[in-house]
Image (cartoon, rainbow, N blue to C red):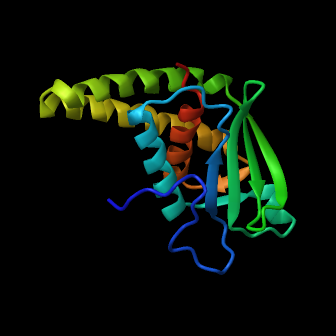
């Protein structure tokens, strides 16, 4: 795997032509309270994969003529996910606010299964690791479907993009 860029990196393969996609993503550092090496690796991989391949069309901004690519900043504000969307020149386009109450259980379950997974990769058999990883993917997939539901009418995106965004939402919820 190629080394993951930082949060401020742009896609190395991005076309100069505007498209409905994310070219840059950052997490509000004040929101992130604590992270360890495993979490940091998950964050780097999610951002790298997201920038490399995604579909993201904010409906209101696109209706006003913004066709991307887009720069996003994710934060948690007042118990809601805030997605600040800007154009390539860093001019604000809109902020999406999504309630996180419906995500509490998937986030908690995802943290629990990830903890089991990280412990398993250090001492479990390959079969045990695969079983835990399958459960982890299942929780992740259901959470991505929930995010797609919450985006309905606000953002047009694909399943893979929703999965990676859910990973980043989880990073925002880690407490020491």
Nearer to the camera, 49 or 55? 49
Q: Quadrant of residue 89?
A: bottom right
In the drawing, does residue 173 fall left or right of residue 71?
A: left
Please provide percent x and percent y for residue 7. 57, 52
Placement of 173 over or under 160, stated as above or below: above
Placement of 138 over or under 57, stated as above or below: above
Q: Could you tell me how many numbered marks the image carries?
A: 0
Please provide percent x and percent y for residue 10. 58, 65
Q: Quadrant of residue 22?
A: bottom right
In the drawing, does residue 52 fall left or right of residue 27?
A: left
Nearer to the camera, 103 or 28? 28
Residue in view at x 51 percent, y 47 percent? 164
Residue in view at x 16 percent, y 25 percent? 123
Placement of 52 over or under 121, stated as above or below: below
In the drawing, does residue 11 fall left or right of residue 45?
A: right
Residue 53 seen: no
Quadrant holding the N terminus = bottom left
Residue 81 seen: yes
Residue in view at x 48 percent, y 43 percent? 43
Please provide percent x and percent y for residue 172. 60, 32
Residue in view at x 69 percent, y 75 percent? 18
In the displayed image of the protein, which residue is found farthest to the right?
64
Please provide percent x and percent y for residue 42. 43, 41
Placement of 3 over or under 135, stated as above or below: below
């Amino acid at each position: 795997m190629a080394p993951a860029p930082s949060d401020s990196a742009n896609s190395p393969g991005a076309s100069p032509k505007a498209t409905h996609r994310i070219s840059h993503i950052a997490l509000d550092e004040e929101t992130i309270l604590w992270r360890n090496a495993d979490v940091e690796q998950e964050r780097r991989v999610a951002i790298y994969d997201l920038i490399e391949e995604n579909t993201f069309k904010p409906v209101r901004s696109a209706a006003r003529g913004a066709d991307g690519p887009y720069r996003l900043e994710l934060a948690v504000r007042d118990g809601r996910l805030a997605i600040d969307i800007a154009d390539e020149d860093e001019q604000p386009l809109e902020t999406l606010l999504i309630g996180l109450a419906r995500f509490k259980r998937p986030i908690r379950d995802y943290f629990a299964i990830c903890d089991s997974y990280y412990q398993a990769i250090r001492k479990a058999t390959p079969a045990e690791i695969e079983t835990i990883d399958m459960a982890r993917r299942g929780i992740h997939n259901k959470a991505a479907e929930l995010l797609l539901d919450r985006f309905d009418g606000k953002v047009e995106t694909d399943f893979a993009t929703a999965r990676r965004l859910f990973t980043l939402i989880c990073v925002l919820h880690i407490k020491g």
